Image: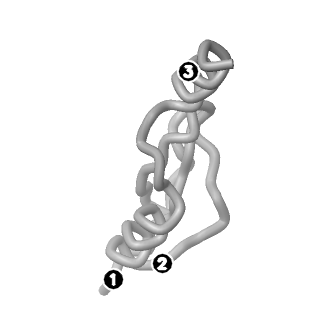
Amino acid sequence: MSTDYTVVYNSEEQYSVWRADTEPPAGWTTTGFTGTRDECLDRIDAEWTDMRPRSLREHLAAVQQ
């Protein structure tokens, strides 16, 4: 039996894998993508290209202007 997972993200646009049959923890939202753990990790690799938290990216963009 294979367990389904879903891709979740938080307000800092950091991604993780969560079991699809449970609610994500507080502060995390599902992206709508569900699959095997490996499929979810592949999706994260494709989408999460900048590992810095959103607040850091925004701060650095503001000080560079």
Q: Circle 2: is it few (<14), some (14-19), or many (20+) Cα within 10 Å?
A: some
Q: Circle 1: is it few (<14), some (14-19), or many (20+) Cα within 10 Å?
A: few
Q: Position of residue 30 (x, y in %)?
A: 62, 54
Whether 16 is drawn above or below 12: the answer is: below
SS at mark 1? loop
User: What is the residue that sits farthest to the bottom in this orientation?
Assistant: 1
Image label count = 3
Q: Amino acid at mark 2?
A: Gly
Q: Nearer the viewer, mark 3 or mark 2?
A: 3
How far, Cα to Cα, is label 2 from label 1?
A: 10 Å
Q: Quadrant of residue 64?
A: top right
Q: Would you name the residue on which mark 3 appears?
A: 60
Please tell me which residue is depicted at 48% across the width and 68% down the height of the picture: 46
Q: Would you name the residue on which mark 2 appears?
A: 35
Q: Nearer the viewer, mark 2 or mark 1?
A: 2
Whether 44 is drawn above or below 12: the answer is: below
Its colouring scheme is one colour
Please tell me which residue is depicted at 49% across the width and 31% down the height of the picture: 53
Q: Quadrant of residue 27?
A: top right
Task: Check the picture and name the quadrant holding the C terminus.
Answer: top right
Q: Would you name the residue on which mark 1 appears?
A: 2
Whether 47 is drawn above or below 42: the answer is: above
Contact between marks 3 and 2 (CB within 8 A): the answer is: no
Q: Amino acid at mark 3?
A: Leu
SS at mark 2? strand
Please tell me which residue is depicted at 43% across the width and 50% down the height of the picture: 16
